[in-house]
Amino acid sequence: MDSLNGISMFVQVAETRSFTEAGRILGVSSSAVGKSIARMEERLRVRLFHRSTRSITLTSEGALFLERCRRILSEVDAAEAELSDAAGSPRGRLRVGAPQLVNLLMPIFDSFMARYPDIDLDIDMSDRMVDVVEEGFDIVIRTGEQTDSRLVARRLGACPHVLVATPGYLKQHGTPTHPSELTRHACLQHRFPATGKLERWPLRREETDPELVLPETITVNTIEPLAYSVLQGRGIAFLPAFLVRDALDQGLLQTVLDDYLDRTVTFWILWPASRYASPKLRVFIDHMSQHLRI
């Protein structure tokens, strides 16, 4: 078991590139992790990591050892899962990556925890594109096209996007009837945190139309603050319909330029193809599929 604990610590350090983060995940101190890695290197008579004050990276021997260790831990997970199946109750820790859509996702996570109290969720909620395999995630929720061959993908659903503003804003500033008129409006925009680029508003235009440069009245790196700002009458925002559905139904917001807009975003749930689909993973996938309403 000591060897197995050492392997688990090695894999966590390799995936997080940090003794401190590996210790946090495993519930031990960073010094305990460092001593475990040092003992392993001494026993194997190889250096597994290049260490500096700024970073930790795998040596070539460490990278080779990592693949073997992942397979070992996968087999252990499979064995534990079989016992869990026999006991009839999914259990254990599940590391989940998800976009920063608190109001959409947290009620689903909360109902999952209520239904499966023996499963501990470790949720990383951010808009950055995590590396599922390298960072040690069990499962992630993403939008858009998925091309990573290391992952299994299951479609959760799709939702349209809309351009919205308050009736009060439109009464004061006028309702645009053509995309070119947006240049005279306050535009509330989303900036992708990973690239720093603004999310493009996919408005149809003729080939002869000039490129549309929209005002950057407000730019935010997550979309929920945009929903707040648009409800305050600050301008026009491009948002997923599920985020503003209630406000639209209540007449607090209205859509504009519907005939010029065509954008649907697909939600996916993904997990490593090499990882055993344990009971805790299967019930989480099923729960998300049943309860995500977009």
Image: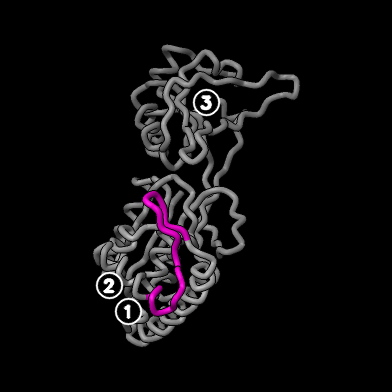
For marks 3 and 2, give the one nearer the viewer.
Answer: 2
Is tag 3's residue or tag 2's residue first in the polypeptide sequence? 2
Q: Is residue 87 magenta?
A: no
Tag count: 3
Residue 256 rendering spot, x and y as whole percentages: 52, 25
Disc 1 is placed on an element classified as loop
Disc 2 is placed on an element classified as loop
Q: Is residue 291 among what the camera can see?
A: no
Kindly report the distance in space between the C-alpha atoms of the residues bearing marks 3 and 2.
47 Å
Amino acid found under the numbered disc labelled 1: Ser
Front-most of residues 55 and 221: 55
Q: Which mark is residue 89?
A: 1
81 is higher (above) or lower (below) than 237: below
Disc 3 is placed on an element classified as loop
Q: Is residue 46 magenta?
A: yes
Quadrant of the rendering where the N terminus is positioned: bottom left
Amino acid found under the numbered disc labelled 2: Asp
27 is higher (above) or lower (below) than 101: below
Horizontal arrangement in the rendering, residue 263 relative to residue 70 (left or right): right
Is tag 1's residue or tag 3's residue first in the polypeptide sequence? 1
179 is higher (above) or lower (below) than 279: above
Kindly report the distance in space between the C-alpha atoms of the residues bearing marks 1 and 2.
8 Å
Is tag 1's residue or tag 2's residue first in the polypeptide sequence? 1
**Residue corresponding to mark 2:** 118
Q: Which residue shows up at 32% across the image and 79% down it?
A: 89
**Residue corresponding to mark 3:** 256
Disc 1 to disc 2: CB gap under 8 Å: yes
Magenta span:
40-57
Amino acid found under the numbered disc labelled 3: Val
83 is higher (above) or lower (below) than 29: below
Quarter assignment of residue 22: bottom left
Residue 158 rendering spot, x and y as whole percentages: 53, 49
